[in-house]
Amino acid sequence: MRNPYEVLGIKEGASEGEIKRAYRELVKKYHPDQYRDNPLSKLAEEKLGEINEAYEYLMKNKHSNYGGASRQGNSNWNNSDSAGFYNQVKININNGNISAAEEMLNQAQNRSAEWHYLKGIIFLRRGWYNEANLHIQTAVNMDPSNHEYRSTLNRVSMAGGGYRQSAFGRGYGQNSDMCQLCTCLWCSDCCCECAGGDLIGCC
């Protein structure tokens, strides 16, 4: 997400009233009714979505200085040493905005222990236990005294152990038995056909 103050065209630290006024003006400007049967309607819709996201962020974080370092001119989220940067990543994760959180981390230059930990949490939310385990293990190795990292690693290892043993096609199991996979698919197809369905059309 871009700096929400820039999106709304206001200075950082603007009052709630200024934020609301800027938001109302931009909503009027980019409202879908203004772009009916207009080739720019898609762009206007995307812009309105960005405006809504910026407004929601600022109203939820009224005292935030976006990224922690933006007052020094860094509004690109590339200062991943900033506590504000990681806080925003966590907010996105907690709100279910996993893609935005991952995009922020991918653009970060410094791959610290916290970076690896949050990357692991993102993979965990997606059910990718092997990747989650690797990144959280890296975070633990970089910061062995962090109790949160260690506790999460233990939970991931317990939750993902069985899954990694049986998963196919994503590299979770290094010795995946393709014959077992084919047998499983064949049996499933037979069961479906017995029930009047068809899992694999070519068989």
Image (cartoon, rainbow, N blue to C red):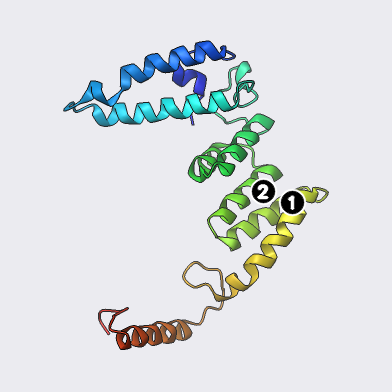
Q: What element carries label 2?
A: helix
Residue under the image location 56 percent in, 73 percent down? 173
Q: Is residue 14 left or right of residue 9?
A: right
Q: How crowded is mark 1: few (under 14 residues within 10 Å), some or many (20 or more)?
A: many
Q: Residue furthest left?
A: 37
Q: In this view, does 189 lie to the left or right of 22?
A: left
Count of number-bearing discs: 2
Q: Residues within 10 Å of mark 2 (few under 14, many from 20)?
A: many
Where is the C terminus found, in terms of image quarters? bottom left
Mark 1 and mark 2 lie on one chain; the one further toward the N terminus is 2
Q: Is residue 38 left or right of residue 144?
A: left
Q: Relative to 15, does residue 67 appear above or below in the rendering?
A: below
Residue under the image location 57 percent in, 50 percent down? 122
Q: Relative to 173, does residue 183 appear above or below in the rendering?
A: below
Q: Tell me, yes or no, whether the two marked residues, 1 and 2, touch with CB atoms within 8 Å.
A: yes
Front position in the image: 28 or 50: 28
* Residue 106 on image: x %, y %: 54, 42
Front position in the image: 48 or 59: 59
Residue to which mark 1 is pinned? 149
Which mark identifies residue 117? Answer: 2
